[in-house]
Image (spheres, rainbow, N blue to C red):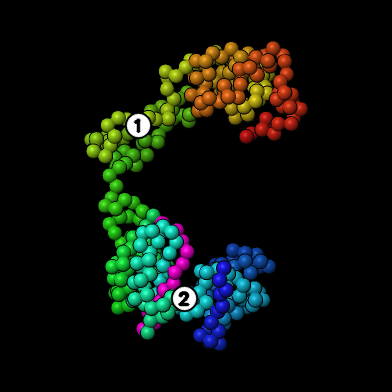
């Protein structure tokens, strides 16, 4: 990290928070115990920077230190570490230009040239004191690259021409609208989306169900949408997309039993069955090792589809384990469960 020094001469000798800022200071100090009020150093420095024309002077940092009862050097350390704090004067409108890879690939170098031509070197303030600029690291708006931040607002999807127009308006006191500078909303497609436009997708009916899946008690009941979908558009696939709903034609539901809780086997002795899976099996009427040992491939397909873990039963060898346990034989895993050495078998997952 580059060495950052604050401008002693430009800062003058005094600093005072604006009267309207005092309520904000009270708000931030109230977030911490009195004996830990120095935890508010970052928001306090941010408020000081705003009240000092966009940068932190040394008197401003001292004022923050005095308010928080901190040594001056501790506040200096924070202010010089975080690049969100500017340590020399800036213009009324300070441009932070993102030069990180996504913006660079989309034209940030052209934007730098505009800033250099319209404003001057980095951190130079124009004679009218209205504009200054610097290059910064990623500002988190990569989908709208290239972009700049001017004071607190993002200006996105820029070109050299559009940035030049923005700087000209700011210099002349004209209104400038932040956000994307092309025909799109936030990060939506330019010109508007052509997909997922049917009203019924957004009225809540598509997510309605009377029963949650995988919890026993039956499958979710289908609820008709409250409005009819639009006619198929050219952007809609001709074939229906596959869904994740359970299919009636997959496998065969295994034998079930209706027995008391006391008669149930401890299915957690089968490696791969934790408390939640055990309860799901109980809800299905599967409660003994004997039942699992008798499962056919069709039964396995049905259970895996219902419980949404394809291939797991065979991979974890439930059937062989269940056969041994049904015959009264202990497995290495069941012995560990009985000894209390398997944490996942003691309680809720």
Q: Nearer the viewer, residue 8 or 49?
A: 8
Q: Secondary structure at mark 1?
A: loop
Which residue is disc 1 drawn over?
Answer: 241
Mark carried by residue 301: none
Q: Residues within 10 Å of mark 1 (few under 14, many from 20)?
A: few
Q: Earlier in the sequence, mark 2 or mark 1?
A: 2
Q: Nearer the viewer, residue 21 or 6?
A: 6
Residue 181 highlighted magenta (yes or no): no
Residue 132 highlighted magenta (yes or no): yes
Residue that extends furthest to the right in the rendered view of this protein? 339
Mark carried by residue 54: 2
Residues in magenta?
A: 128-142
Query: What residue do we see at 55% from left, 79% from top?
Result: 6
The quadrant the C terminus occupies is top right
Measure the alpha-carbon separation of dots 2 and 1. 53 Å
Give how far across and how far down residue 285 sits, in percent: 56, 18
Report which quarter residue 325 is drawn in.
Answer: top right
Q: 70 above or below 240?
A: below
């Amino acid at each position: 990290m580059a060495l950052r020094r604050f401008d002693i001469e430009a800062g003058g000798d005094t600093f005072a928070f604006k009267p309207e800022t005092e309520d904000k200071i009270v708000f931030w100090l109230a977030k911490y115990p009195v004996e830990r009020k120095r935890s508010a150093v970052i928001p306090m420095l941010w408020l000081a920077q705003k009240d000092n024309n966009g940068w932190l002077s040394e008197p401003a940092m001292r004022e923050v230190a005095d308010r928080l009862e901190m040594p001056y050097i501790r506040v200096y350390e924070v202010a010089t570490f975080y690049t969100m704090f500017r340590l020399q004067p800036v213009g009324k409108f300070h441009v932070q230009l993102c030069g990180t890879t996504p913006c660079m690939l989309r034209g940030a170098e052209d934007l730098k040239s505009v800033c250099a031509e319209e404003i001057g070197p980095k951190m130079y303030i124009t004679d009218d004191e209205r504009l200054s600029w610097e290059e910064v690291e990623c500002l988190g708006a990569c989908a709208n690259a290239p972009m700049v931040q001017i004071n607190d607002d993002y200006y996105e999807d820029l070109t050299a021409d559009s940035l030049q127009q923005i700087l000209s308006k700011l210099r002349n006191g004209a209104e400038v609208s932040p956000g994307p500078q092309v025909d799109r909303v936030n990060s939506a497609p330019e010109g508007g989306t052509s997909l997922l436009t049917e009203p019924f997708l957004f009225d809540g009916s598509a997510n309605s169900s009377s029963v949650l899946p995988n919890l026993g008690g039956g499958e979710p009941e289908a609820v008709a949408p409250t409005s009819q979908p639009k006619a198929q558009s050219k952007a809609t696939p001709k074939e229906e997309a596959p869904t994740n709903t359970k299919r009636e034609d997959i496998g065969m539901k295994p034998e079930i039993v209706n027995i008391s809780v006391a008669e149930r086997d401890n299915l957690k002795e089968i490696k791969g069955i934790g408390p939640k899976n055990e309860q799901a099996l109980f809800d299905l009427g599967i409660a003994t090792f004997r039942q699992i040992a008798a499962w056919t491939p069709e039964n396995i397909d049905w259970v895996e589809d219902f419980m949404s873990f394809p291939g797991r039963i065979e991979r974890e060898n439930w059937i062989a384990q269940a056969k041994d346990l049904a015959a009264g034989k202990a497995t290495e895993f069941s012995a560990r469960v009985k000894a209390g050495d398997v944490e996942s078998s003691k309680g809720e997952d």
